[in-house]
């Protein structure tokens, strides 16, 4: 605490509490065998406004023969504008009030003084300062989007996802930060720009950049930016048939396609149309091999290994997109590479139990249950095939929480102990890893030791 605050506190305390030293000297004549109490108000604190401040005078000391007559006298000098005083303390000035609490109501420094009294007199005051800062966090702006529409459409913006961590009422500040060269719009033409859902009417084609800042009355948010894509007439949609992939020998049958990346610049609802372009030699597949050619993610049942080419077009109600092609390649089993199993490192469990003796006979408690995590996640498949895991331990002393996962907890239940004896078990744990056709194995040991010893 700065020296100036402590000096101010000392002057204030002398005025508010009186001359404790004289009172103490007078009383100590009748209790010469006891020293005066010593107050310890605790360390300085820094808290945010509204948090509960806990005081603690338990570090104070006093004469043992007066232990049941000790009184704690707390005093508070609050910052200007605060209504907090001694009456704000819980159980104020009661013998039990070693640790009263209060809630600050203003930002600033609260100077707290503690005087401890017993029949022999009063301690010198001890001080602490509680530094209270604003609890306010900056709000977060979210301007929504992206938005699209046509020239002269009324475009409604949506900043309702903006929020303030303290749920304070917010002010909204919308601006047009960039417009196409053909536009004459300015920020003043964002209607209801002081609210969460203003509107704007674009006057030409192009991209309009809109920014939003919100304020909780104390702090401003960072700038959120969104875009309005404007066209004067319908624009053709864009088809996206997904990524070309080599599915290996472990491909699902049927396989699933993904056209969800398709989009329309005008925001129009899309209709999907898939077709089979080509199939491997010998294949009897056709468009009928789709479960539904109008879905964005249809399934396709294949019959031969090799490359299948698929085409997707989308329709916005006015125009069809250009076609997009995707290739899915399915390998035969001869090209499959088996997985590699890696069960991780050997593990060790060590524990002990308390033993007691009576008439030279030792009785020991059981060693407590122990667990360790086994990690097979370093196993891999060179083809990128999905892997299937299975952990096992032949004696079943080791219980496995998730034998079919890459990670599992291995648990040894409570075991009997003997005094002075290391009872050790070495348990072998196997990990089998498989793709759709081949498997691999690795193993580790889990060494468990239980020892009985004096408590």
Image: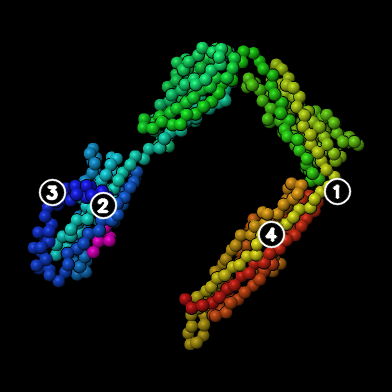
Name the residue: 14% across, 62% down: 121
What is the crowding at mark 4: few (fewer than 14 residues within 10 Å), some, or many (at least 20)? many
To which residue does mark 1 refer? 334
Label at residue 132 = none
C-beta proximity under 8 Å, tags 1 and 3: no
Residue 62 lies in the magenta-colored region: no
Residue 193 x, y percent position in the rendering: 45, 20
Q: CA distance from mark 2 to mark 4?
A: 57 Å
Q: Residues within 10 Å of mark 3 (few under 14, many from 20)?
A: few
Q: Secondary structure at mark 4?
A: loop
Q: Which residue is under mark 2? A: 128
Question: Which segment did they paint magenta?
Answer: 57-61
Horizontal arrangement in the rendering, residue 432 relative to residue 137 (left or right) = right
Mark 3 touches mark 2? (CB < 8 Å): no
Instruction: Report, in whole angstroms, how far the alpha carbon at label 4 lies from the one at label 1.
Output: 27 Å
Q: Position of residue 255 (x, y in %)?
A: 77, 38
Say which residue appears at 69% left-offset and 59% top-offset: 343
Element carrying mark 1: helix
* Residue designated by label 3: 15
| Mark 3 vs 4, N-terminal side | 3
């Amino acid at each position: 605490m700065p020296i100036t605050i402590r000096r101010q506190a000392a002057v204030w305390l002398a005025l508010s509490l009186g001359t404790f030293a004289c009172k103490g000297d007078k009383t100590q004549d009748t209790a010469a065998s006891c020293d005066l109490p010593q107050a310890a108000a605790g360390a300085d604190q820094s808290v945010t406004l509204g948090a509960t401040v806990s005081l603690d005078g338990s570090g104070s000391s006093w004469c043992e023969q007066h232990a049941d007559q000790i009184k704690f006298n707390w005093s508070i000098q609050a910052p200007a504008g605060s209504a907090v005083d001694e009456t704000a303390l819980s159980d104020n000035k009661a013998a039990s009030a070693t640790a009263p609490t209060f809630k600050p109501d203003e930002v600033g420094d609260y100077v707290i003084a503690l005087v401890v009294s017993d029949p022999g007199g009063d301690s010198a005051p001890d001080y602490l300062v509680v530094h209270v800062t604003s609890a306010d966090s900056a709000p977060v702006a979210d301007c929504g989007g992206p938005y699209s529409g046509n020239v002269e459409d009324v475009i409604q913006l949506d900043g309702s996802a903006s929020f303030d961590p303290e749920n304070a009422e917010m002010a909204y500040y919308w601006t047009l930060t960039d417009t196409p060269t053909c536009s004459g719009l300015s920020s003043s033409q964002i209607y209801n720009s002081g609210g969460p859902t203003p509107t704007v009417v674009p006057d030409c084609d192009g991209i309009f950049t809109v920014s939003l800042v919100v304020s909780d009355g104390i702090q401003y948010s960072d700038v959120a930016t969104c875009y309005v894509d404007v066209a004067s007439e319908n624009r053709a949609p864009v088809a996206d048939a997904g990524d070309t992939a080599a599915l290996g020998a472990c491909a699902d049958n049927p396989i699933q396609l993904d056209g969800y990346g398709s989009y329309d610049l005008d925001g129009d609802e899309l209709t999907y149309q898939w077709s089979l372009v080509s199939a491997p030699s010998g294949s009897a597949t056709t468009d009928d091999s789709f479960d539904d050619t109008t879905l964005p993610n249809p399934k396709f049942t294949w019959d031969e290994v090799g490359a299948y080419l698929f085409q997707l077009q989308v329709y916005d109600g006015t125009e069809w997109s250009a076609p997009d092609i995707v290739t899915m390649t399915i390998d035969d089993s001869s090209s499959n590479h088996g997985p590699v199993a890696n069960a991780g490192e050997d593990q060790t469990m060590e524990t002990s139990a308390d033993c007691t003796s009576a008439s030279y006979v030792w009785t020991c408690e059981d060693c407590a249950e122990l667990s360790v995590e086994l990690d097979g996640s370093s196993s891999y498949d060179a083809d990128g095939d999905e892997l299937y895991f299975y952990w096992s331990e032949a004696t079943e002393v080791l219980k496995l929480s998730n034998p079919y996962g890459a990670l599992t907890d291995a648990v040894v239940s409570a075991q009997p102990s003997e005094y002075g004896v290391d009872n050790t078990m070495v348990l072998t744990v196997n990990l089998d890893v498989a793709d759709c056709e081949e498997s691999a194995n690795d193993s580790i040991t889990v060494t468990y030791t239980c020892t009985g010893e004096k408590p």
